[in-house]
Every structure is written in C-alpha cells, then in structure tokens.
Amino acid sequence: MSAPVFDAALRGAPTFLVGSDGRVAGLAVHRLRRPADGDDAWLLDRCAGPVVDLGCGPGRLLVALAERGIPALGVDHSPVAQAHCRRRRVAMVRRDLFAALPEEGRWWHVLLADGNIGIGGDPASLLTRAARLLRPGGTLLVETHPEPERAWSGTVRVCSAGRLGPAVPWAAVGSAALRRLGRSLGLREGPGRDGRRCFVELTAG
C-alpha cells in the first residue's frame, strides 16, 4: 500500500477500506507486517532475476527475495514503510511509482502484490507504467481481487482507530478482468492461481 493514508495499516492497527461503491473491505494488516508466507511463494517462485516491488510496504517480500539471493528494490511513498524497510535492511526508495526509478527498462520482474493493482485508481495506467520498467520478456506478477470479473475504479477512505481518512483513488481487478486488460495493452497472458489469494502473470513484449 503506497499512499501515506495507509500508514495506520503498516503500523498494525485494524484497518478497513470504505469504497465509493459502498463496499467495506478489511486489510490483512498482520500479513503486511509478518514474514512472507506460503501464499506468497507463488510470486516468489516466479522471480529468477532482479525484481522491483511497487507499493512494497514494510518489505516482507523484499526480505524473502534477499533470502533467495535475488536482487530487489522496493518502491513506496510511505515514511512508515521506509522505516520498516530500513530496519529490515532491504533496498527501498521512497517515491511515487510514476516518478523516475532506478534501472527503468531493465527489471526482470515487477510485483504488484497485496491489492496494489489498485494504486492510483487506473489499472491500465499502472500496468503500462509497470511494463515500462521491465526488460523485453520480463513479467508482471499481480495479485488480483478474488472475484474474477471484478473491475472497479473509484475512491476509498481508510478507516482505522475510529477515524475515516480522505478519499483516495483506488481500484479492484479480478483475474479475468486483468487478463482482458493486459491483452488490450499488448501484454501476454501467463499462468495464474485462484484460491484464498489470487495471482496472474503477464509478460511484456
């Protein structure tokens, strides 16, 4: 989660997203803060070279990649995320992911985990941006909404400790919707996984 409004979740407070469509969804706060687990293995096992994790949060995937000997860089706008990454001694830049980033066009893999396909509320723009970070044949590894056809863009407000934050642009995209979007952007479909957490791989040309 890259926006500073998600800092409460990164600190471990129970946190909910209240969407402009009326839906309320809880954030997996404990998962964000604890080490990578078995479900994350689907993403990690597909990383064979340098990785950039967009919206890296407290850096749990960066730690897991380092343990596998895979170079990785996290990108997040949150100072809380930056502090977590420093404590964990993983590489991270505190920056808007649409700003200039190191090694653009050379990364083997881009991660958009934990719902981060929603960042900015415009999944097409986000996928286009992520694809520009990749070398030819590089992959985007995206965690999707559990409803395959879900394709929603709007705003969310973060509710934590009884307080409701400002509206920020956000989106939710299921696996089927993401595959269609990827095809429209010239990305090739790869494997995916449905279940408690859902993932899709897309390959850049």
Image: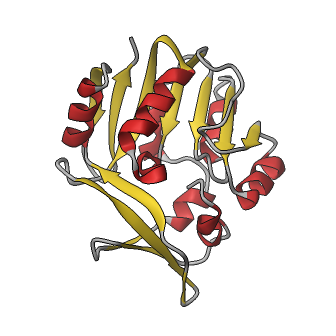
* Residue 74 location (% of width, % of height): 67, 39
**From the viewer's perspective, is 124 left or right of 146?**
right
* Residue 164 location (% of width, % of height): 52, 83
Picture layout, residue 59 above or below residue 24 = above
**From the viewer's perspective, is 19 left or right of 53?**
left
**From the viewer's perspective, is 19 left or right of 174?**
right
| Residue 44 showing in the rendered view | no
Q: Quadrant of residue 107?
A: top right
Image quarter where the C terminus lies is: top left
| Residue 132 showing in the rendered view | yes
Picture layout, residue 47 above or below residue 57 = above
Image quarter where the N terminus lies is: bottom right
* Residue 166 location (% of width, % of height): 54, 75
Please state which of residues 46 and 101 is positioned toward the viewer in this rendering. 101
Residue drawn at x 61%, y 14% as measured from the top left: 106
Give the number of marks: 0
| Colour treatment of the image | secondary structure
Please state which of residues 73 and 97 is positioned toward the viewer in this rendering. 97
Please state which of residues 51 and 120 is positioned toward the viewer in this rendering. 120
Q: Quadrant of residue 42?
A: top left
Residue drawn at x 82%, y 52% as measured from the top left: 87
